[in-house]
Amino acid sequence: MAGASLTPEVHPRRNFWTHLRPYRVYASAIRFSHTLCLGGLSFLAFLILVVTGVLLLFQYLPGVDRAFAAVTAIDSVFPFGRLFRALHFWAGQIMVLTVFLHMGRVFYTGSYRPPREMNWIIGVGLLVLTVVLDFTGYLLRGDQEALAAATIGANLMREIPGVGSALASIFFGDVSGGGATLPVYIWHIVGLPMIIGLLIGLHFWRVRKDGIRRPL
Amino acid sequence: MNKSPAARKPELPPVTPSTRQNGALTQPTAQPEQARHEKVPLAELASREWVTGLIAGNFILALALWLPPALGYSSNAPTPGGTYAPWVFGPVQVLLRWMSPLLGGVLVPVLGLFSLVSLPYLARKQAWRLAGFLFWAFYLAVIVLMAYFFVGH
C-alpha cells in the first residue's frame, strides 16, 4: 500500500522547468504499473482538450440562437469538424474519469498525508474544476438538454443563501433561452482552462517538491 | 509539518564499496533497496511518455470515431417529456429526486468536498479510521449514485 517517498536530486541549473523535468529521474518512478499513471493520463486528456478546443473556436459562435446552428455546422459542414468535436467530447469524459480514479489511487497509497496536504487540496480543486469545465462544455452545445441543464444549474446556484443570485448571474448570465450564453462561453474557453492550467503546474511542482510516491 | 527538504529525504542504504576485479573497478550487484534509488536519463521517461501518449491518444481517437457524441434538438423546439443531466452530474440529479434543491444540490455536495479537504488534517491528528471512512463513504456514494443514475437513464 504505502510506497517509498523519493525526493528529486539537486542539480546546478535549477529552475521551474528543470524542477518539473529533472535531467535524471528515479527508475522506479517511471516503471509501468497497474495504476496506469492516471494523473498523467488526465493531463494528456487536458492537452487534447486544449488543442481540439482551439480548433473548434475557429467555427463556434456563442449565443442562444447561434450556438446550436454553429455546432450543427461543425458536425456537418466543416472538414473534420465532427471528428474534432468528438475528440473534444471524449477527451473531456476521459479527463473527468481519470481525475476521479486518480484521486482514489492517491488516497489508497496514502499520498494525501503530510507533507503532501497542500497537493491533495489542489487536487480536490482540480477535480471540482474539471467537472465544472465538463458541465460548461455541455451547456455550449446549445440544444434542449443544455437549456435544461443550465436552468437547473442556475436555479441550484440561486439556492446558496445570500450570494446565490449574484453568483448565478456572474457564472451563467441569462439562461432563459439556452445554456450557451456569453459568460458560460468565456468561463469555458478562458477562465476555467487558465485556472486549471495554473493548478496543474502547481500540482506537478508540488509532486516533485514533496517526492513521488509509488505506484504512480 | 514544515520539515526541511533534508529532513524529508529518505535514508539511503549504506553504499557497498567498489571492489577491484580483473583490473577494473566493479560494483556488486545492486540490492533491491539500492535499485529503488537508481536513476535514469530524462530521455527514458520521455520515450515512455510518448508511447503511453500514443496508446491513450489512439484510444480516445477510436472512441471519437466509433461513438461520436450526439446532438439533441434545438432549444427552440418543443420541450421533451424528460431530460437528464450530463453523467458527471448524475449523482446530484439522483439526490435531487430525494431531497430539496438546497440540501441535495448544494449542501450535500459541499459537505462531501469539505470532507475530502479535511482528510490531510485528520491524518495529521492520526485519525486514520475517520479519514478512511469519510473518503470511502464519499467515493462509494458517488459510484453507487452514478450506477443508480445510469440504471434510471
Image: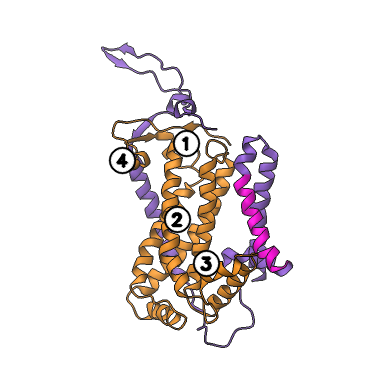
Q: The residue marked by circle 4 belongs to what chain? A: B
Against B23, residue B32 (above or below) is: below
The hue used for chain B is purple
Residue at x 48% of width, y 42% of height:
A216
Residue indicated by mark 2: A196
Residue A195, how many percent across, how many down?
44, 56
- Foreground mark, 4 or 2, reads 2
Q: Would residue A99 be visible to someone looking at this image?
A: no
In the picture, the disc for residue A210 is: 1
Q: Nearer the viewer, residue B80 or A196?
A: A196
- Amino acid marked by disc 3: Phe
Tell if the residue under mark 2 belongs to the same chain as the one under mark 1.
Answer: yes
Residue at x 45% of width, y 66% of height:
A187
Q: Give me the C-alpha separation between circle 3 and circle 1.
A: 32 Å
- Amino acid marked by disc 4: Ala
Tell if the residue under mark 3 belongs to the same chain as the one under mark 2.
Answer: yes
Left or right, B14 with respect to B136, comes to left
Sooner in the amino-acid sequence: mark 2 or mark 1: 2
Against A144, residue A25 (above or below) is: above
Q: Secondary structure at mark 1?
A: helix
Residue indicated by mark 3: A135
- Magenta segment range? B99-118
Left or right, A88 with respect to B103, comes to left
Q: Would residue A155 be visible to someone looking at this image?
A: yes
Whether residue B103 appears in magenta in the rendering, the answer is yes
